[in-house]
Image: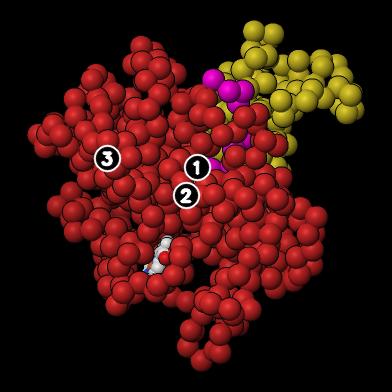
Chain colours: A yellow, B red
């Protein structure tokens, strides 16, 4: 699983780092998301999916490892 | 002077925990509806935006939808402000600014409101909660949780944040509450607003001279040259006003919801770790702000299938957006176990609530400590007699009589 974040969409809620600090961080500069890792292990998949679902900016997307980023490698994170 | 008569605007009406019947009817029919906005049969109107996707579109698009107030009785202007004019009491009020001005101000404040920074306040907020719960214990049973807990707790946390000394807090908070109370006359409200605004101006001046390590001191130290005293005063007033009624409304209404769902109460008591998701669901289910700052369309734009013309105004209903099935299944049910969803209780886009991390922490601490202190908390009045608070910008309870 690869996690990507779109900092243009991020509204700086800090929710993702609140719930999954192993994967997400929040910049002290602009309050927006930073990735602690783009490749969390499978054990974190469920929490990362939860973070993506809750993200108010819809800034978090999940992709299959090694995917090219095309639409078909993006999971539907809206649930 | 008595409040102007007539029914409350449709977007502020509620029915217990739900949006009002008329508001729900409008939301069910279409995502954007034209509603009258003037007295009687005047021709004034605004667009009421109720659908989840339409609300996201409007709040997420600061280029086409401005929050800046453009009308008023400004000196020397006939109704419409010139582009470079902002009335004195709006200076520093983030929600009145559009980017790039908004970006400049918000950037200065953001570092003080990150999750990490806010967590440093946790011990103080826990102490404040404990103090207030001591007061509840002394007052009852029965006791009014609104007067003894929800209101003073949210106020004390904000005073702590902006550094209002303990001795000044009571008078200061009373003025802030009076200013927000739509049940009071215009003059009384203006006088209260002016008084706490003056108090904050003095607080800001003090921090300029001799900054401490609180929020204001940090801002002055790190960004002193980029922000004026007037702007900082406005920021403080905004923090106070944005953080009082929202939090007290959530604490009082949320406690009532929990008392009506004993299973959830038991769950939080057994495992305080579950309080996070309960808070998140209460934020969505109750959505205490009726609406964020009204938006003005800067160009013609289609929203929810409706053409909105440049210059027209939009009122955005957050409670209906958060009860839209497009957001989550069975939205009218209170269900902390539902799949995580991107609710809009804190708004969206560049004006997304600056205090969201603080609000979430306050609410988690507030509910957890309340339930821990009173293992047998129960209503001390018939549920039908608990009065809902209508005359404020955020929904809440007037009183919540409890026993234990
Ligand atoms: C449950 C509690 C709260 C709720 C539901 C809430 C909700 C909101 C909403 C909906 C907005 C967007 C307004 C708009 O788009 O026009 C907002 C903005 C804001 N909130 Fe909150 N709020 C809460 C608590 C707080 C607290 C505790 C603080 C401060 C300590 C705060 C500070 C602010 C500020 C400064 C803004 C303006 C941000 C900007 O315009 O950039 N809020 N809030
Ligand atoms: C010098 C300071 C201020 C004065 C003289 C003042 C005056 C007023 C007046 C006359 C009203 C209308 C009362 C009515 O409609 O009956 C009002 C409403 C209000 N003011 Fe202020 N104000 C001041 C500062 C502020 C600030 C800084 C804020 C920041 C958020 C603020 C927030 C509000 C809100 C939320 C309302 C309620 C709007 C409503 O009724 O829906 N005020 N103020
Ligand atoms: S949850 Fe979304 S909006 Fe909030 S900080 Fe993380 S990426 Fe940004």
Residue that sits furthest to the left in the current view? B138
Q: Is mark 2 within 8 Å of ligand 1?
A: no
Task: Compute the Cα span from label 1 to label 2.
Answer: 6 Å
Please name the residue shown 53% across and 37% down the image. Answer: B284
Residue at the disc numbered 2: B14
- Rendered view: A3 above or below A55: above
Q: Which residues are magenta?
A: B337-346
Residue B229 visible somewhere in the drawing: no
Quarter occupied by the C terminus of chain A: top right
The magenta stretch spans residue B306: no
The numbered mark, 3 or 2, whose residue comes first in the sequence reads 2
Say which residue appears at 39% left-offset and 74% top-offset: B4
Q: Which residue is mark 3?
A: B400
Q: Which mark is residue B391?
A: none
Q: Could you tell whether B289 is left or right of B364 in the image?
A: right
Q: Callout 3: 10 Å neighbours few (<14), some, many (20+)?
A: many
Quarter where residue B47 is shown = bottom right
Q: Which quadrant: the N terminus of chain A? A: top right
Quadrant for residue B144, please give it.
top left
Mark 3, secondary structure of its residue:
loop
Give residue B145's position: percent from left, percent from top: 24, 38
Location of residue A44 in the rendering, given as x and y in whole percent from the top left corner: 64, 12
For disc 1, the marked residue is B18
Image coordinates for residue B318, horizontal then vertical, percent: 57, 48
């Amino acid at each position: 699983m690869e996690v990507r974040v779109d900092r243009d969409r991020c509204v700086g809620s800090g929710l993702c780092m609140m719930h999954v600090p192993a994967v997400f961080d929040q910049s002290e500069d602009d309050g927006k998301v930073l990735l602690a890792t783009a490749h969390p292990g499978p054990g974190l998949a469920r929490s990362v999916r939860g973070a993506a679902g809750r993200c108010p900016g819809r800034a978090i997307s999940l992709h299959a490892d090694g995917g090219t980023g095309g639409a078909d490698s993006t999971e539907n994170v809206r649930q | 002077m008595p409040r102007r008569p007539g029914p409350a605007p449709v977007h502020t009406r509620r029915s217990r925990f739900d949006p009002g019947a008329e508001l729900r009817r409008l939301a069910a029919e279409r995502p954007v509806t034209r509603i009258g906005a003037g007295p009687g049969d005047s021709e004034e109107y605004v667009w009421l935006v109720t659908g989840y996707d339409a609300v996201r579109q409007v709040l997420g698009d600061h280029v086409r939808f401005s929050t800046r107030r453009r009308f008023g009785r400004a000196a020397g202007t006939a109704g419409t402000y010139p582009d470079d004019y902002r009335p004195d009491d709006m200076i520093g009020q983030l929600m009145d600014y559009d980017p790039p001005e908004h970006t400049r101000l918000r950037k200065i404040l953001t570092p003080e409101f990150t999750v990490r920074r806010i967590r440093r306040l946790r011990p103080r907020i826990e102490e404040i909660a404990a103090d207030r719960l001591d007061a509840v214990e002394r007052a009852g049973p029965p006791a009014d949780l609104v007067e003894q807990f929800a209101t003073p707790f949210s106020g004390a946390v904000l005073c702590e944040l902006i550094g209002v000394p303990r001795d000044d807090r009571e008078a200061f908070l009373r003025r802030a509450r009076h200013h927000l109370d739509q049940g009071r006359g215009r003059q009384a409200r203006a006088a209260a607003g002016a008084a706490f605004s003056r108090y904050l101006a003095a607080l800001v001046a003090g921090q300029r001279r001799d900054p401490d390590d609180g929020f204001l001191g940090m801002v002055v130290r790190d960004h002193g040259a980029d922000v004026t005293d007037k702007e900082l005063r406005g920021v403080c007033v905004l923090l106070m006003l944005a953080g009082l009624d929202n939090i007290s409304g959530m604490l009082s209404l949320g406690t009532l919801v929990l008392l009506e769902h004993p299973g959830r109460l038991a769950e939080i008591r057994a495992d305080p770790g579950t309080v996070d998701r309960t808070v998140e669901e209460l934020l969505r289910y109750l959505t205490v702000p009726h609406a964020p700052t009204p938006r003005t369309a800067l160009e013609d734009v289609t929203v929810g299938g409706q053409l909105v013309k440049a210059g027209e105004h939009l009122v955005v209903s957050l409670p209906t957006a958060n009860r839209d099935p497009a957001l989550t299944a069975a939205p009218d049910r209170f269900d902390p176990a539902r799949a995580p969803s991107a609710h809009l209780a804190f708004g969206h886009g560049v004006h997304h609530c600056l205090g969201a991390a603080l609000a979430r922490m306050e609410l988690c601490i507030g509910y957890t400590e309340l339930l821990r202190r009173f293992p047998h908390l129960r209503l001390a009045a018939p549920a039908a007699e608990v009065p809902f608070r209508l005359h404020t910008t955020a929904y809440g309870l007037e009183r919540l009589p409890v026993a234990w």
